[in-house]
Amino acid sequence: MFLVRKRKSKIYLLCKKLLILRGNMKLNIFLDEKKTVAIVCNQWGDTGKGKFVDYFAKWADIIARGTGEANAGHTIILNNKKYVFHLVPSGILYDSLGKINVVGRGVAFDPRAFIEELNILDKENMTYNNLKISLNAKLILPCHILFDRLKESNAGANKIGTTGRGIGPIYVDHYDRKGLTVNDMLNKSLFEKKLKKNITENLSLLKNYDKEMIKTILMHSHLENGAFYNEETILDIPQIINYYTENYADKLRKYICDAEEFLRENVHKKKILLEGAQGLLLSVDHGSYPYVTSCDTTISGLTKGVGLSEKDVDLNLGIVKAFYMTRVGQGPFPTEMGGELSDKHCSSNTKDTERATYPNASLNSEDELQLGIAVRYIGQEYGATTGRPRRTGWLDLPLLRRATITNGPDIILTKVDVLNDAKKIKLCTEYEYNGDNYYYGDKLIKKGDKIKIAIVDSLILGRCKPIYKEFPGWLSEIKNIKEYKDLPQNLKNIVEYIEKDCNVNVRIISVGAERDETIIKG
């Protein structure tokens, strides 16, 4: 009996290898003559970028991140093992194959968090010999994390849903021209001078906050469990200097370089994969402001963050979760299943509590809240960084049309298999504005107006009623299908409707979590 199981296992592994080889051949044909490919997200993040960075990494010579921070989690599943990275590029899994992974200047760099991820790689016996970190990356300091958490804890009803990793404050310092960079860690006297100037200017802001709250925050593991706390001065400057210029710098020194010059030297020569973070709808420039992150998460921000231009990119692929979408934290979400009730539920529950409360939630439930819970549970829609339940809603085509204006028409549909058992699929095709008269520049938006292309203004988006078109579901397993022509007709009908209605090209469809559960449509 044991021998039979062993033989089956070998056959299974052989078939798996053959499928991967076949997939790699199709990928090489798909990317024929292309040198630089970018992967970005056309939604609010959490769309499966990690899988596709992993998918394209074997093709690439260089994998580079140009945006994102420690609040942006990327999940990769490889041979049923889950890896979650926040700062280390997802392509690091292929370091042993000689792939070069780059952290660009557009990344807000937390050295403690980065080293923590390297330690995980060490534990897993995974190498990172070909890692490069931009000397120009913005350096997150303890005061950034402290201010971020203080501000959010005092915001009350005005919270925007920050993860408390110091992202907002570091960008304030950057644009106020008092921020530090990764390279400063390598020059102790200069680091000390810049740090003292930065902290002196920022400490005066702490007088309005409770001292016990400050102490509690500084005792957190993200702040070295109190190592940076001083009862008299609040922040222990000598300790910060020692940690950054000795502990952190010693670990990272050999990886720090002019990463942008390296990429400019290799563009159009080597095969480069650019890895985006978060999503366009979280972009500080293009998203649902103020419920956004602090950087530009579009293709424009990504290329700028690695020292290249959009013209250097041969193919930009925008990822779209289908046929639902998710959002973490605060902000308008027109198609949210359960509406305001869902928003409140997600802010006060966990995966375990909602499963215990709604054990029979179904994809075919008439209750919108329970439908959203079922989608979330099947799709494992819980934040990679925060663990928060993600708010779920139907795919929003007005938002997709808006996203492709910036990120281009080529898209990847992911997580399609989550809805295998749904009897009906709904797509939001347009909005009906349901608020007071609102001037948007020279346009007057009135109650009852139909909106085909989303206006990503929170005041407008929060007053939009979705108008849906329903499609019958396909009600079958699809993860083993390798060709588009073999997909269920009901599924293809939805794909082709989206292509025609939004003027997009669906290039790839993900039908499962594994890298080989992928269909290249063309």
Image (spheres, rainbow, N blue to C red):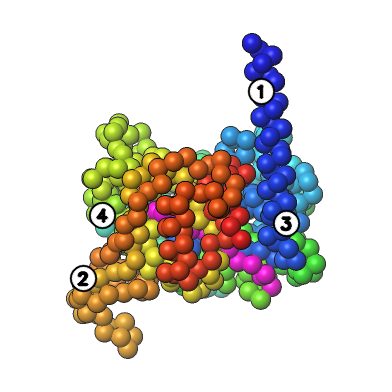
Q: Is residue 101 above or below residue 400?
A: above
Is 479 in front, or is 339?
A: 479
Extreme residue in the top direction:
1
| Residue at image location 77% in from the left, 43% down from the top | 96
Label 4 close to label 2 by CB (< 8 Å): no
Report the disc number at residue 8: 1
What separation in Å lies between label 4 and label 2 (alpha carbons)?
A: 15 Å
Query: Relative to residue 33, is residue 494 drawn left or right?
Result: left
| Residue at image location 64% in from the left, 11% down from the top | 1
Q: Which residue is mark 4?
A: 339
In this rendering, which labeled residue sits more in front, label 2 or label 1?
1
Q: Which residue is mark 3?
A: 28
Query: Relative to residue 151, is residue 435 drawn left or right?
Result: left
Amino acid type, residue under disc 2 in the picture: Asn
What separation in Å lies between label 3 and label 2 (alpha carbons)?
A: 48 Å
Report the disc number at residue 434: 2
What separation in Å lies between label 2 and label 1 (alpha carbons)?
A: 59 Å
What separation in Å lies between label 3 and label 4 (alpha carbons)?
A: 43 Å
Amino acid type, residue under disc 1 in the picture: Lys
Where in the figure is residue 296, as x and y percent of width and height? 52, 68
What separation in Å lies between label 4 and label 1 (alpha carbons)?
A: 48 Å
Say whether disc 4 or disc 2 marks the residue closer to the N-terminus.
Answer: 4
Is 318 in front, or is 488?
A: 488
